[in-house]
Amino acid sequence: MDFSSISLSCSSELEHLVMEVGFLPFFKNKIAGFSVEEMTPREYWFDAENEGPWEWKMTIVRNWNCAYGSYFNGKSGYLSLEWFRHLVNYRRSKFSFSNAPLDADGINRQKYIYDLVVNNESMLSRDIKRACPFIDFPKKRLSPQEKLLGVRVEKDRGESFDKVISALQMSTMLAIADFEYECDKHGNPYGWGLARYAAPEVLYGEQLLSSPCSPEESFEKMLEHLRRLLPDAEEKELVKLLL
């Protein structure tokens, strides 16, 4: 496929493309042209007159046809559910909470946050942070901008919240269920939208995520698909997308 000829202008075009190609990173990477960033004209970025990639992801996630999250080297991107099930099958076979680091208080932050989200079915990022004993929010009143950024003070030098939540997505233990705006006192939404997290099983169902393949077979199927999709890409870069 000639990705250089693609110019995205709306969420439906992006969703159709993801369904067609199966894998699509959000940001520019070492595979030239293979990203939402490179396929979207500049006028759709941060423009009050036009919705763009940051807004499109909210619509796409809510349509339940594609998974969106930190799936490519810790960076965001899309997968069709057809291929997401293979990614889950492979990555979970390599993941164990027992390998996650403990912080200075002996807390396995990945396990703590995963259990917290699963026990509540889904949670906003803001509410996860507030429920974690290893994150202190300042007692001062926060501005809307500070709230959006989730201003906090870490008690120790353990993994940051962003690193932990990214690791849980990379392992496919958590997925983004939605993006929700915070509202000011007049009820007007502001900001980029807060991510709501849930286990993929909750979002897409146990049956959808089950695979008749072994983890190794899932990996080979994904790699062969990427080879056909990106024949000019280096093999090591294709492998990096899947690890």
Image (spheres, rainbow, N blue to C red):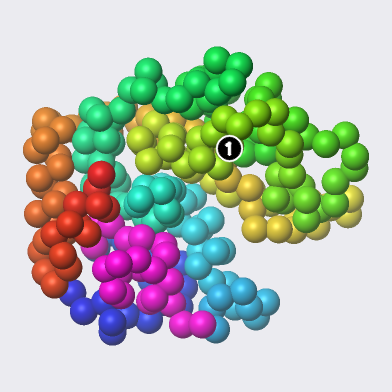
Residue 65 seen in the current view: no
Residue lying at 37% horizontally and 18% vertically, measured from the top left: 98
Q: Is 37 covered by the magenta stretch? A: yes
Element marked by disc 1: loop
Type of amino acid at the residue the image marks with label 1: Ser
Q: Is 70 drawn above or below residue 15 in the view shown?
A: above
How many numbered badges does the structure rendering display? 1
Provide the residue designation for mark 1.
160
Q: Residue at x 14, y 52 (%)?
A: 223
Residue 217, visible in the rendered structure: yes
Residue 215 at x, y = what percent?
Answer: 15, 33
Near-viewer residue (235 or 196): 235
Residue 196: percent from left, percent from top? 57, 40
The stretch of residues the image draws in magenta is: 21-42
Picture coordinates of residue 60 (x, y %)? 45, 57
**Figure quadrant of the N terminus:** bottom left
Q: Residue at x 21, y 35 (%)?
A: 90
Q: Is residue 87 above or below residue 9?
A: above
Residue most toward the top? 106
> Viewed as shown, does residue 72 lie left or right of 187?
left
Residue at horizontal 72 percent and vertical 51 percent from the top: 148
Residue 204 x/y as whole percent: 37, 36
